[in-house]
Amino acid sequence: MSLCFRLLRVGCFYKRVIAYAKKTTTMELSERIRKIRKAYNLTQADIACRLDIAPSSYGQIERNAIKASCQTLLKVANAIGVSLTFLVDIESRKFVEDKNTG
């Protein structure tokens, strides 16, 4: 598979993720990010350190998640240790519930 074709596939994938994220409400996505972070027993300061930003800056990302760029959401997902698609899939609550009860 050529590099150009792979880049096109990745670009299309992220466009779909962004389109899906825009359909969600800010509150739903923000709440999901917060729940996933807490399920991993991470603080906002932990994630901010991994992103090399101030904790207050990360707090703003978490409170206004839908306004964050796709790149920022990808960095947050990587810092937490989940995929971008999992991070923005607000209808998938099972992981967080299982993680908290297990």
Image (tube, rainbow, N blue to C red):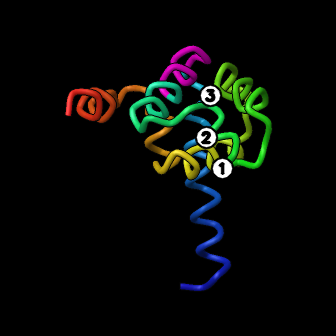
Please give left or right for residue 85 compared with residue 71 in the image.
Answer: left
Residue 99: x percent and y percent? 28, 34
Indicate yes or no whether the magenta region holds residue 95. no
- Residue carrying label 1: 50
Q: Give the range drawn in magenta.
A: 25-32
Q: Is mark 1 in CB contact (under 8 Å) with mark 2?
A: yes
- Up-down: is 1 above or below 34? below
Disc marking residue 22: 3
In depth, the one of 5 and 30 nearer the eye is 30
Residue 36: x percent and y percent? 44, 33
For mark 3, give the secondary structure: helix
In depth, the one of 19 and 81 nearer the eye is 81
- Say few, some or many: other residues with alpha carbon within 10 Å of mark 1 (under 14 / 14 to 19 / 20 or more): some
Q: Label 3 amino acid?
A: Lys
- Say few, some or many: other residues with alpha carbon within 10 Å of mark 2 (under 14 / 14 to 19 / 20 or more): some
Q: Distance between the residues labelled 2 and 3?
A: 27 Å
Mark sitting earlier along the chain (2/3): 3
Residue 59: quarter of image: top right
The residue shown at (51%, 19%) is 31
The residue shown at (61%, 40%) is 46
